Image (tube, helix red, strand yellow):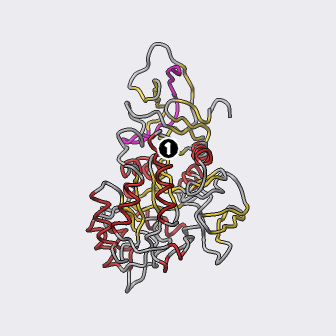
Amino acid sequence: MAPSKVLAGARVVLPTGIVDGGRVIVDGARIAGSAPPQHEHLDLSGHWLVPGFVDIHNHGGGGASFTSGTVEEVLRGVHTHRLHGTTTVVASTVTGDMHGLAQRAGMLSELAEQGDIAGIHFEGPFISPCRKGAHSEELLRDPDPAEVRKLIDAARGRAKMVTLATELPGGIDSVRLLAEHGVIAAIGHTDATYEQTRDAIDAGATVATHLFNAMPALGHRSPGPIAALLEDERITVELINDGVHLHPASLELAFHHAGADRVAFITDAMDAAGFGDGRYMLGPLEVEVADGVARLVEGGSIAGSTLTLDRAFQRAVTVDRLPVEGVVAALSANPARLLGMYDKVGSLEPGKDADLVVLDSDFALKGVMRGGEWVVDPQLG
């Protein structure tokens, strides 16, 4: 058992606000309310202390794919994101044949049972060919509830989210099925109208998959899904804050219209995150990563991102000038609540897992702790 630790002197972001010169006590794998007599003391003056980040939409990193990698490769991808502050990650798949996706779900569910990942997100194949993005069109299919159920069953209780184009045949019934089984129904890669999106929300959809991307633009006569998703308090909107997927004005519009409690910053990362430029495979499609931007070799569509959540945090505060407390909510508390894990992660409160991130005064990452153990030790640089 690691010795107890008192992390003192930092600006600590709590659910109640920012505490200057605060402290967080770590006893074993949990945050404690008081320090035992024997403990280590770490002075974090001049730093920020925030909860570990929670990423609900992530396809891989460190050169490894969650869709096609071996167990060892998936774990390498998970570790890559931990090095950047993501202490809780949901493994996202991309469109594939149903048999292959069911097999992948079985493997990933074992990693979820071991606590390496928080669950599985199926992005595709139940999406619109009109808004397919970096998904193989020949493998797309309508969201037949029976087939959606097959994937849920294959995940053995570890399916956390399914992205659907809910306007397709079977879409609304599939949303109801997912809601009944406690799985998040996310509206994305969709060509839905405003009215069709409202119907899906009323049926139980609660998340907008990477808002603005892979859906019709906001129009003054045809507001489409964006207006419906932004205006409804039942919806949490995913945002990819890498400076590529969204213009800063679009991000600001979403953040301020939805409110800080309805935003989840995600990476939508693919293999190249934390790894580098080059050629990669995203499912069956080849991707070229140049200057950190991933695009399909054929057609040039953006193919996920190379983002890590520490960069999303720093950009949100220093470039977008969003309030720190709101950014922390979007990176930790809000996604933790969506996953039903807020009793364990998402804030720095006694009794919760000791998952936390240390940032310097410029919001650059300096330390990462998961379960009371340093993944990145701020004392070692």
Name the residue located 65 percent from the left edge and 75 percent from the top edge. 300
Residue that appears at 40% across and 57% down: 161
| Point 49% across, 42% down: residue | 52
Q: Is residue 102 above or below residue 131?
A: above
To which quarter of the image does residue 259 belong?
Answer: bottom left
- Image coordinates for residue 322, horizontal then vertical, percent: 49, 56
212 sits to left or right of 82: left
Q: Position of residue 190 (x, y in %)?
A: 43, 74
- Image side of residue 229 versus residue 52, left or right: left
Q: Is residue 67 visible?
A: yes
Circle 1 residue: 111
Q: Nearer the viewer, residue 71 or 349?
A: 71
Judge by depth and name the residue closer to the eye, 346 or 295. Answer: 295
Q: Which residues are magenta?
A: 1-18
| Residue 362 in view (yes/no) | no
Task: Left or right? Give the position of 47 relative to 166.
Answer: right
